[in-house]
Image (spheres, helix red, strand yellow):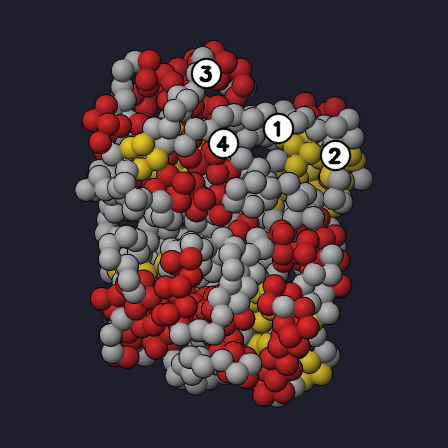
Amino acid sequence: MSPVKTTCPYCGVGCGVLATPAGTPNATTDAARAATIAGDPDHPANRGKLCSKGTHLGETIGLEGRLLQPMIGAKIAEWPAALDLVARRFAAAIAEHGPDSVAFYASGQMLTEDYYVANKLMKGFIGTANIDTNSRLCMASAVAAHVRAFGEDIVPCSYDDLDTAELIILVGSNTAWCHPVIWQRIEAARAARGTKLVVIDPRATETARAADLHLAIAPDTDVALFNGLLTEAKARWRLDGRALAERVTVPDGFWPAIAVADVAATCEISADDLQAFVDLFLDNPRTVTLFSQGVNQSTSGTDKANAIINLHLATGRIGKPGAGPFSITGQPNAMGGREVGGLASMLAVHMGFSPEERDRAQRFWQSPTMCAGPGLKAVEMFEAMASGKIKAVWIMATNPVVSMPDRALARKALAICPFVVVSDCIAATDTGFYAQVRLPALAWGEKDGTVTNSERRVSRQRRFMAPPGEARADWWAVAAVAQRMGFAGFDYPDAASIFREFAAQTGFENNGTRVLDISDRATITDGEYAAMAPFQWGGASPFATGAYPTPDGKARMVAVRYQPRADGSRDFPLRLNTGRYRDQWHTMTRTGLSPKLSQHRPEPLVEVHSDNARRHGVVDGGLARVATEQGSSIFRVAVTPDQRLRDLFVPIHWTDQTSSEGRAGRLPGRDRDPLSGQPGFKNTPATIAPY
Ligand code: SF4
């Protein structure tokens, strides 16, 4: 067979993949489902490269562990019976308790078409904005910062900017492990052009060790660092006066007054290192600041992102080749979800909840009712469930019992909620345990639709294997329930028809007010959709003209101030950070199937500084219990100089299904950013003791 062009299902780099099935197209046995995987040389995101996870995709497409039939309780059911039950229970909850008594918890793993149908059902037909997504845990702070600064959720950079930058600053990102193909591109730019690299991260990761300068700042002190840099740029007359006068609104009382010496003390770095950073920044105007979860997963994540954006706006380092603040998403389609409106804080296609925008969406959807305003963000949704306010929830392509902070909350919420539906391609998940109905979903290689990567590039995920068993597309299940609830406008024959409707909505009464506009694709044929090449909405540099999608056309500086976090208590004097391993993805339901990927880090380790280890009596290679206010779990100890003195690090991947211990999911608390609602996963008061 000739290779099928598709897109990697893992991280937000969005690499193009050539999948060549080894068996017959409709094969459903494991052996016949094998495929050869290669990077797509024509895809602009990766130009033929893949990381270890993408390279080993072919080992992960078997049927082991798959959910292949609808389940009602412990019994196999037919699709019509399962869909009837879902529609009936949702309708009953709405009739008795109102539309806000139901909720939908979605995922950055879903395709844009799945997201579009779910968002339309909830916000336009059921009439609640209680649809949120695990992307809330991933990059919601960047979204909130973009909207504050630019008036719309726009990532202003492209990967090409990495090729032309003089200076790349990585903030809160272990790029070498978490976005490896971007890392390869950065390394190539450094080798070819001498691009300087600064890494800002409390941990000495593989990425940090390769940098020209590593600033191991104290956790959550980023705002002080970037405000200090801005103050220094202003003091040395290095701001872009023209950009500030013509393109940026600077509110009264904006300018932070923070002395460089105070910045070094706050961030717990040396004055020399800070000075070296200031000099590198001022000497290299073509700067890309790439930021990820270390910025976003914080109780001050939105302010951190705005501190970075402020710096770029004030120094004119945006809207030009090789310059800009660049949020890199974790999941393969967090961006697509943001585009359709799959966050409780957005309506649809980058619109908010003003009366005009609600009216516009209602007329486009021809819907009977509209949500009144923003809905419950992820943690709020589970809190509402735990307090009995949510009577029915549909969870799709995600495992919140593992991934939500305060695991006791997620368990209590799902145990109390009278009706839980879980759509997943995996049979045994920690969340599925609580479901009254489980619906079998398609997996990568079986799904058909689109995803959007971190640089706003839309690519096709294409089917190259037949759906196994009774597995069906997620959009199909949502549309089938919508129709059973009596709603018109959900009779989609295929993913192409949904994409066309989404594309049309981006242009509906847009009149140039929003950058997201792909309405030129609203009339593409099925054949054009099937053959659609990757494309980037907003162009390579959406702000190249200097105009922003705000009422006055100017970007907005946002006055942000560093707010120290309270120190941990005597019981929890340390700070727990969580993150990924290079060769695993989320809860390992797919990457765990590859023996090669499992060799890199076969067990979860708690990384601890040697002084800290000595003080707490734990030894390298021994076992230790890591505890927080929320719970505890046992890990093998790795004593390393890579950790700051008071910090611990554990990986996120292990679950109840894979291990009784080594469970990072038991540890983080519910503290979250007040604007974005994103939890502060990377700075939880903790302690460690020998086990
Ligand atoms: Fe997949 Fe990300 Fe690796 Fe690319 S960098 S192959 S998208 S996991």
Please tell me how crowded label 4 is: few (under 14), some (14-19), or many (20+) other residues with Cα within 10 Å. Answer: many
Instruction: Point out residue 478 in the picture as x, y percentages from the top left corner.
Output: 51, 75
Instruction: Point out residue 195 in the picture as x, y percentages from the top left corner.
Output: 28, 31
Query: According to the image, label 1 marks what residue?
Result: 565
Above-or-below relation of 626 to 350: above
Query: In the image, is 241 to the left or to the right of 598?
Result: left
The residue at 56%/61% (across/down) is 130
Above-or-below relation of 373 to 304: below
Three-letter code, disc 2: Ile
- Pointer 1 or 3: first along the chain: 3
Three-letter code, disc 1: Arg
- Pointer 4 or 1: first along the chain: 4
The residue at 68%/43% (across/down) is 669
Please tell me how crowded label 3 is: few (under 14), some (14-19), or many (20+) other residues with Cα within 10 Å. Answer: some
Residue 688, numbered label: 2
Q: Are marks 2 and 1 in contact (CB under 8 Å)?
A: no
Query: According to the image, label 4 marks what residue?
Result: 201
The residue at 75%/28% (across/down) is 569
- Pointer 2 or 1: first along the chain: 1
Query: According to the image, label 3 marks what residue?
Result: 258
Please tell me how crowded label 2 is: few (under 14), some (14-19), or many (20+) other residues with Cα within 10 Å. Answer: many
Three-letter code, disc 3: Ile
Q: Mark 2 against mark 1, which lies toward the viewer?
A: 1
Please tell me how crowded label 1 is: few (under 14), some (14-19), or many (20+) other residues with Cα within 10 Å. Answer: few
Q: Are marks 2 and 4 in contact (CB under 8 Å)?
A: no
Query: In the image, is 273 to the left or to the right of 45?
Result: right
